[in-house]
Each structure stands twice: as structure tokens, then as C-alpha cells.
Image (cartoon, rainbow, N blue to C red):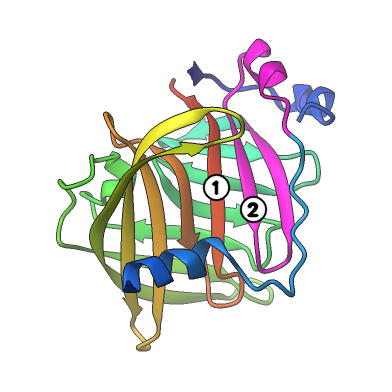
């Protein structure tokens, strides 16, 4: 179901409604058990009745889960915000920025054919993609990390995304940073369109991977 943007004031009213590849996948989707994750209960029926675009945001590093509602579109990027002043900005399926989920990611610059941004179907992705992450530090200072990611198509399967079954194709990205570190992303793309239903993406050396489940898609 395709949804639109909600005005910021309406968010408050919904606060209560709301082999190696296998090892990589398990490591990404099953974070450190020492961190207790609190996942909010989401009332999908209420979100659909309100005609909202919404996402579930999970930060394993700090053990926070929250629901964000689309409140703004700017330059093809959608800002999702929650009642507890946390949020993500998505550019297509790319996590472009984060707020309140650990160490804030300010922006990601990437190439024009980045398949996360263009929402390309699995199997049509370029061999590799290079992205640069801009991370907030003290005051007005920023740190940058550039990484190159190779991808491999995984399983066809059906996943449960907040009480809705989605037919998806799994794509795993194996990435190397400019300092030689290795990180991994995992994406679950709509089998027909390539749009993201679930993604776990690296967002910085401290914050690590953030998982976003798309409860209902946005379309202007």
C-alpha cells in the first residue's frame, strides 16, 4: 500500500498506535545479545486507516526501537520522525541520515546509479558501489568515511514486515572502508519492483548498522 506524508502535529496523536553469507546475515540481523532491544508494538490497522507512510527503526547499538512517520520530502529524500525525537531520512532505500539512534549520520554522498537510491531490482545492480558517509562530531566538525561495496544476491523468500507478508529477494553487500575495515549491509527488496521493505545498513563506526522496516511505502 502506498502512503503519503503526515503533518508533524498529527504524529503525537498516533503515539499509542504505533555458509559465509549465512554468517554475515545472522551477524547483521542478530546483534550483540548483551544489548536489550525494546521494540514498540505497532498498530498497522491504525496506520493504514490514517493513510500514513511509516517505518520501524531499530538501533541495535543502543537497544532502541521506534516508529517514524513521513513528515517531509526534500530533494527526493523522505524524513521520518518519531514522537521521541528520533528519525531517519531515506533516499529511495538508502539510509541518508539518522537522528537520535546513536551517533548522528549527517549525510551520505553516492554515485548516480546507486541501486539503493534508484531502487533497482536484484540482479541488475552494478558490480560495486562507492559511498561516502558524513558523521557528526563535536561542534561543527564532521568526519568522513568512504567505502566500496560488492553485492551478492541471496534467497527468494517471504518476510513478515509488521504483520504484513512481503515477497522479497535478499541482497547482501560486503563493504570495505578507506581505512581497511570491513562492514556488511543486508537488504530485502520487493521481488517485483526492487523497492526496499527491510534493510540493515552501516551508518557509522560507533552507531553501526541501523535496521529499517518499511511499514507502508511512500509515494508522492
Image coordinates for residue 15, horizontal then vertical, percent: 82, 31
Instruction: Please name the residue shown 43% across and 64% down the image.
Output: 25
Task: For the residues labelled 2 and 1, say whether their Cβ atoms are less than 8 Å apart.
Answer: yes
**Residue at 58% over, 22% down:** 5
Q: Is residue 22 above or below residue 50?
A: below
Residue 121: percent from left, percent from top? 23, 40
Question: Local crowd at mark 2 within 10 Å, few (<14), some, or many (≥20)?
Answer: many
Decide whether residue 185 is among the magenta residues: no
Q: Report how far apart the C-alphas of labels 2 and 1 lie in the structure.
A: 6 Å
Question: Which is nearer the eye, 120 or 146?
Answer: 120
**Where does label 2 land, which residue?**
58
Return the residue found at the far bottom.
180
Q: Position of residue 164 (x, y in %)?
A: 54, 27
Q: Which segment did they paint magenta?
A: 42-69
Q: In the image, 12: left or right of 205? A: right
Q: Nearer the viewer, residue 11 or 122?
A: 122
| Left or right of 122 in this view: 214 | right
> Mark 1, residues whose alpha carbon is within 10 Å: few (<14), some, or many (≥20)?
many
Numbered circles on residues, count? 2
Residue 212 - label: 1
The quarter of the picture where residue 62 lies is bottom right
Q: Is residue 61 above or below residue 172?
A: below
- Residue displayed at 37% across by 88% down: 179
Q: Secondary structure at mark 2?
A: strand
Position in image of residue 81 (x %, y %):
67, 39
Q: Earlier in the sequence, mark 2 or mark 1?
A: 2
Amino acid at each position: 500500500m502506498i502512503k503519503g506524508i503526515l503533518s508533524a502535529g498529527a504524529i503525537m496523536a498516533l503515539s499509542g498506535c504505533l555458509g559465509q553469507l549465512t554468517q554475515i546475515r545472522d551477524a547483521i540481523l542478530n546483534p550483540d545479545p548483551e544489548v536489550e532491544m525494546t521494540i514498540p508494538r505497532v498498530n498497522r490497522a491504525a496506520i493504514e486507516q490514517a493513510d500514513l507512510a511509516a517505518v520501524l527503526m531499530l538501533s541495535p547499538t543502543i537497544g532502541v526501537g521506534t516508529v517514524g512517520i513521513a513528515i517531509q520530502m526534500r530533494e527526493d529524500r523522505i524524513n521520518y520522525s518519531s514522537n521521541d525525537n528520533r528519525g531517519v531520512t531515506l533516499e529511495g532505500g538508502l539510509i541518508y541520515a539518522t537522528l537520535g539512534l546513536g551517533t548522528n549520520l549527517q549525510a551520505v554522498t553516492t554515485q548516480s546509479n546507486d541501486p539503493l537510491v534508484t531502487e533497482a531490482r536484484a540482479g541488475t545492480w552494478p558490480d560495486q558501489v562507492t559511498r561516502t558517509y558524513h558523521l557528526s562530531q563535536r561542534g561543527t566538525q564532521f568526519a568522513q568515511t568512504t567505502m566500496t561495496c560488492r553485492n551478492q544476491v541471496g534467497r527468494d523468500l517471504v518476510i513478515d514486515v509488521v504483520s504484513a507478508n512481503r515477497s522479497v529477494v535478499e541482497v547482501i553487500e560486503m563493504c570495505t572502508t578507506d581505512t581497511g575495515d570491513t562492514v556488511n549491509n543486508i537488504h530485502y527488496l520487493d521481488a517485483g519492483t526492487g523497492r526496499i521493505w527491510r534493510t540493515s545498513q552501516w551508518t557509522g563506526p560507533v552507531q553501526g548498522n541501523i535496521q529499517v522496516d518499511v511499514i507502508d511505502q511512500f509515494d508522492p
